[in-house]
Image (cartoon, rainbow, N blue to C red):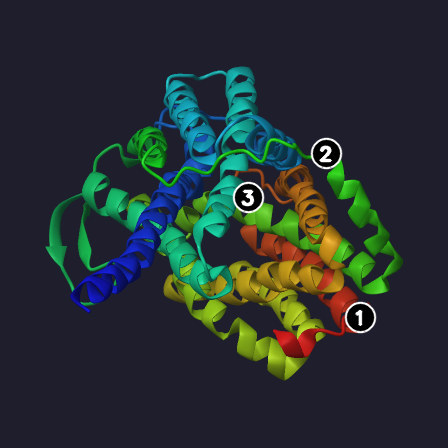
């Protein structure tokens, strides 16, 4: 009896320990992104005198857009071929993350647009596949992935928030003191704060190396050896016979483009309204707090409203979000708080879209379908980068400053197109809605 009880307790501890190890993995994975991506645009655009690189709007749009698209297009080939045919997942992620750390640190020493563009593309190709690989590793070892994966994956969002807030409060402010309202630890902005923002990328480089080394301690996940066709997503093209899938892809391309514009412009937009640059990371992480909340209610919303209205609600949240941004006469706190709409945007549209495709596709093409939707949405950043530069040029005044009011209203109007597509032309063509 005693031996049996001990064995049972050991068996219970192992799943808990595995969940802890995977939670730490996701925490580190997304902390490496959340600590520098939100402020990158500010580093690139700020003048050399301010401590930035002084890149133009077109250069900013290209650096923020092209690498993300190239990384998204390359990810299925790298993740599918290398992890499934040649290398264990945990070792491949370790190599990719350590390489990413080296590339990020090297970037912080460069001033040339050409070098930045090249290294950002290389780092994106190396870094983006680690997202799918991390998910794959977790699914390979979790016994009840459907129930346990959301809990461990939530620590990725927490990692994004903690890294951003921690860097801002420790490195960008002095004379810290506690207050009861967020961001809780506040102080005076450090001198030359714009130049110090680039240290966020150096911190991200260090975290990437730490994450890579940590991956070597994760459960062994060997390759399947049989390999995967790098163009396996071609099997999913049969989904285009469904009108709902065509509409979803068209709306998704629009949403992915304007989501990219958010990351390109927000880090420069909020300081133009008076937000201290030291508060950029905490302010922008409001979006991630909301993401956690709305993901909890996604299943309930799908049961009550169905895919059509949940997806349309996610698209309309983008419309509202950018309309608030465009109303620059609103109090700064209201504009910052509007980023809470990101929870609706992400949960209802992005998560909802991937769930819909999962239910629409036949079982044997579901993985390929997810690859296909990832590729389509991956085209959005480069379109968003070019569009951002075009709109910025159109709404830049004689003083060289962007008039952000018409800028964001235009982006909001583009979101209306996606909303109308979903609300007016999307019809649920699955038969599994009740199983969600």
- Residue at which label 3 appears: 402
Residue 188 is marked as none
Q: Position of residue 283 (x, y in %)?
A: 36, 55
| Picture mark count | 3
Q: Quadrant where the N terminus lies?
A: bottom left
Q: Position of residue 425 (x, y in %)?
A: 82, 69
- Residue at which label 1 appears: 429
Give the structural element (helix, strand or loop) at label 1.
loop
Residue, far right: 241
Crowd tier of the residue under label 1, counting other residues whose Cα lies within 10 Å: few below 14, some 14–19, many 20 or above: some
Crowd tier of the residue under label 2, counting other residues whose Cα lies within 10 Å: few below 14, some 14–19, many 20 or above: few
Q: Quadrant where the C terminus lies?
A: bottom right
Where is 30 relative to 336, above or below?
above
Where is 88 relative to 306, above or below?
above
Give the CA separation, mark 2 to mark 3.
47 Å
| Residue 275 appears in the picture as rendered | no
Query: What residue lies at 54% left-to-right and 33% top-to-bottom?
Result: 223
Give the CA separation, mark 3 to mark 1.
44 Å
Give the CA separation, mark 1 to mark 2.
28 Å
| Residue 232 appears in the picture as rendered | yes
Q: Is residue 82 left or right of residue 291?
A: right
User: Foreground: 409 or 294?
Assistant: 294
Give the structural element (helix, strand or loop) at label 2.
loop
Query: What residue lies at 57% left-to-right and 56% top-to-bottom?
Result: 405
Q: Earlier in the sequence, mark 2 or mark 3?
A: 2
Q: Is residue 260 left or right of residue 280?
A: right
Marks 2 and 1: in contact by CB < 8 Å?
no
Q: Earlier in the sequence, mark 1 or mark 2?
A: 2
Query: What residue lies at 46% left-to-right and 71% top-to-bottom?
Result: 296
- The mark lying in front, picked from 1 and 2, is 2
Residue 229 is marked as 2
Q: Position of residue 435 (x, y in %)?
A: 64, 75
């Amino acid at each position: 009896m005693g031996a049996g009880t001990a064995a049972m307790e050991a068996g219970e501890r192992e799943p808990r320990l595995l969940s802890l190890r995977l939670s730490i993995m996701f925490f580190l994975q997304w902390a490496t992104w959340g600590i520098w991506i939100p402020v990158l645009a500010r580093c690139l655009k700020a003048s050399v005198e301010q401590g930035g690189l002084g890149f133009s709007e077109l250069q900013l749009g290209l650096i923020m857009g092209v690498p993300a698209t190239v990384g998204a297009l390359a990810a299925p080939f790298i993740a599918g071929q290398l992890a499934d045919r040649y290398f264990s997942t945990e070792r491949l992620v370790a190599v990719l993350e350590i390489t990413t750390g080296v590339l990020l640190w090297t970037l912080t020493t460069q001033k040339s647009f050409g070098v930045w563009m090249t290294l950002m593309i290389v780092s994106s190709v190396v870094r983006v596949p680690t997202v799918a690989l991390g998910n794959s590793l977790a699914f390979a070892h979790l016994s009840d992935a459907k129930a346990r994966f959301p809990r461990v994956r939530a620590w990725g969002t927490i990692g994004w928030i903690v890294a951003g807030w921690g860097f801002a409060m420790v490195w960008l402010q002095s004379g810290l003191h506690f207050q009861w309202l967020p961001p809780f630890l506040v102080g005076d902005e450090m001198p030359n704060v714009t130049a110090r923002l680039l240290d966020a990328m150096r911190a991200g480089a260090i975290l990437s190396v730490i994450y890579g080394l940590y991956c070597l301690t994760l459960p062994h996940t060997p390759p399947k050896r049989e390999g995967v066709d790098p163009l396996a997503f071609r099997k999913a093209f049969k989904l285009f016979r469904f009108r709902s899938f065509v509409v979803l892809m068209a709306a998704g391309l629009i949403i992915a483009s304007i989501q990219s514009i958010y990351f390109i412009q927000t880090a420069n937009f909020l300081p133009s309204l008076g937000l201290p640059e030291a508060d950029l990371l905490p302010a922008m992480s409001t979006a991630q707090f909301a993401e956690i909340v709305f993901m909890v209610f996604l299943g309930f919303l799908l049961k009550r409203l169905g895919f059509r209205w949940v997806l349309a609600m996610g698209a309309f949240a983008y419309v509202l979000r950018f309309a608030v941004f465009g109303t620059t006469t609103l109090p700064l706190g209201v504009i910052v708080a509007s980023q809470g709409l990101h929870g609706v945007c992400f949960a209802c549209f992005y998560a909802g879209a991937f769930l819909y495709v999962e239910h629409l596709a036949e079982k044997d093409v579901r993985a390929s379908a997810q690859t296909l939707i990832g590729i389509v949405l991956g085209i959005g950043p480069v379109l968003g980068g070019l569009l951002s530069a075009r709109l910025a040029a159109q709404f830049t005044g004689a003083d060289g400053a962007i008039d952000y009011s018409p800028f964001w209203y235009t982006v909001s109007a583009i979101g209306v197109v996606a909303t109308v597509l979903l609300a007016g032309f999307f019809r649920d063509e699955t038969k599994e809605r009740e199983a969600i």
